[in-house]
Image (cartoon, grey):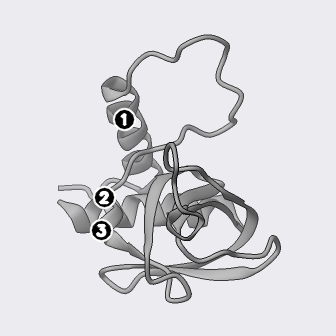
Amino acid sequence: MKTPTLEAEYEQLVKENLAAAPAPTGGAERREHPRLKVDPTQFTIPSAPQMSVLDVSLSAIALHSNHPFAPGEEVRITLANGFSVEARVRSCELEETGPGADLLDTPFRVVCQFHELHEGMELIVTAKRAGT
């Protein structure tokens, strides 16, 4: 039996994710690459022990963290199976968690950009393989 290529596995994940996603509300999608939901327990960033991945695309990963990052900072994103990639912090913003939220409890929304698109594809497919 032929093993699917990385690209074929990625395309299948995109189809499955888009089929399961609710229809967008208002306006056209501006992003070049679809954002995919992943199992956040598969991911760690050693410099941010308290973090949770929101979504991943070919070009970037979005996460919540209690640790602030500086734009331009390099981070290593590691999967539970040991696979890892480097990414550059594109943005880090305080995000309110609700009315009366204490500043210390407010997470940062961090977006990190992969250096190459194939790194995002490999991270997404490897995380899916590890989670099944």
- Which structural element holds mark 2? loop
At label 3, which amino acid type do we have? Thr
Gap in Å between the C-alphas at discs 1 and 3? 18 Å
Gap in Å between the C-alphas at discs 3 and 2? 5 Å
Q: Mark 3 = which residue?
A: 41
Q: Mark 2 = which residue?
A: 39
Picture coordinates of residue 85 (x, y %)? Answer: 56, 78
For marks 1 and 3 on the same chain, the one whose residue lies earlier in the sequence: 1
Instruction: Count residues near mark 3 (Cα–Cα under 10 Å), then give few for <14, some for 14-19, many for 20+.
Output: few
For residue 43, which quarter of the picture?
A: bottom left
- Residue visible at 55% across and 37% down in the picture: 34
- Residue visible at 36% across and 39% down in the picture: 12
Gap in Å between the C-alphas at discs 2 and 1? 13 Å
Q: Mark 1 = which residue?
A: 17
Viewer-side residue, 109 vs 117: 109
Picture coordinates of residue 4 (x, y %)? Answer: 32, 53
Quadrant in the picture for the N terminus: bottom left
At label 2, which amino acid type do we have? Asp
On residue 128, which mark appears?
A: none
Closer to viewer: mark 2 or mark 1: 2
